[in-house]
Amino acid sequence: MIKMVALDLDGTLLTSDKTISTTNEKTLKDLHKNGVKVVLCTGRPINAIWHFIEQLGLTEATDYTITFNGALVVHNNDKAELAKSGVSKRAFSPLHDFAKSENAPLDILDFEQVYSMTDLKPSMYKQQFKGNINFVPTAFDQLNSNDLYSKAIVCDHPELLDQFQSGINSTLRSQYHIVRSQPQIMEFLAPKMDKVVGLKALLQHFGWRFNNLMAFGDAENDLGMIEKAEVGVAMENGKDEVKAVSNAITVGNDEDGVAKYIKHFFG
């Protein structure tokens, strides 16, 4: 029995203009009202998507959000942390060295703000970021070695990101879970970090398992939850590798694909 629906945002629940359609909003509110947990799963912090949480009415006592691609599970009502997993500054040192050698930008995030590396090529991340988060220009050497960080991001023009990605060797690849969440964004997470990690913690919190989960997604950072869920739904506009591991494919994010599949499945 499906008791939880997990939703990626960009390219999935959100339209191309980064909004939740009226149809998707109503359908998810009805689902939530009928007792099914609606959980947003994103790479962003909760403050950056709070307007979506409020729009969907996900502010009740048992509502949670998966943030930072699984590294942090947040209780929406009071922003308390249910589960959290970070990495050290030292873990990002090889990535910083590689970015420098490739003349690539780099942003490193903790669980509250973004540190834009001033000793590297200027990043596009701040200009394209949608949401409320503080950007702090910082050289890599100035990062606090005692803090934990959620992920690193390389944000550049898609064609330049293609070149950067092709240059990543097997040694560097083994040190991170690397996902292309958008054409212009590549994310570097802890080796085993995935949205599945956060979802597992949340499902266990409710005494449920992955056979109680339905998940919607379109990109590389959704692969894990699409494959692990009892019902994994890929968007028509999604990557081929996501479609390949899904149980179903719905219409695109600009055609209310989430709402149409939910109505079909739940009747």
Image (cartoon, grey):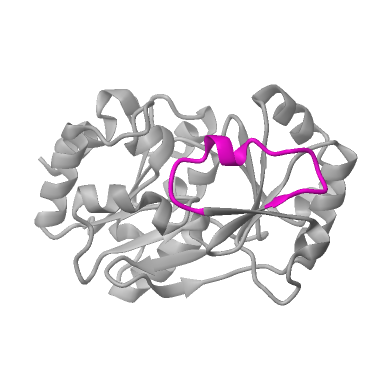
Query: Residue 11: x, y in percent?
Result: 41, 32
Viewer-side residue, 137 vs 263? 137
Tell whether position 60 is magenta: no
Instruction: Name the residue located 60 percent from the left edge and 61 percent from the top edge.
Output: 150
Question: Chief secondary structure of the magenta span?
Answer: loop
Query: Residue 109: x, y in percent?
Result: 61, 57
Q: Quadrant of residue 206?
A: bottom left
The span picked out in magenta is 116-133
Instruction: Name the residue located 76 percent from the left edge and 73 percent from the top edge.
Output: 145
- Looking at the image, is 261 positioned above or below residue 87? above
Viewer-side residue, 15 vs 109? 109
Instruction: Name the residue located 34 percent from the left edge and 29 percent from the top edge.
Output: 15
Whether residue 92 is visible here, answered yes or no, is yes
Tell whether position 125 is magenta: yes
Viewer-side residue, 164 vs 245? 164
In the image, 52: left or right of 263? right
**Residue extending furthest toward the right:** 101
In the image, 178: left or right of 253? right
How many numbered discs sit on the rendered protein? 0
Viewer-side residue, 125 vs 162? 125
Q: Quadrant of the N terminus?
A: bottom left
Instruction: Name the residue located 72 percent from the left edge and 46 percent from the top edge.
Output: 106
Query: Residue 209: x, y in percent?
Result: 34, 66
Q: Quadrant of the C terminus?
A: top left
Whether residue 217 is visible here, answered yes or no, is no
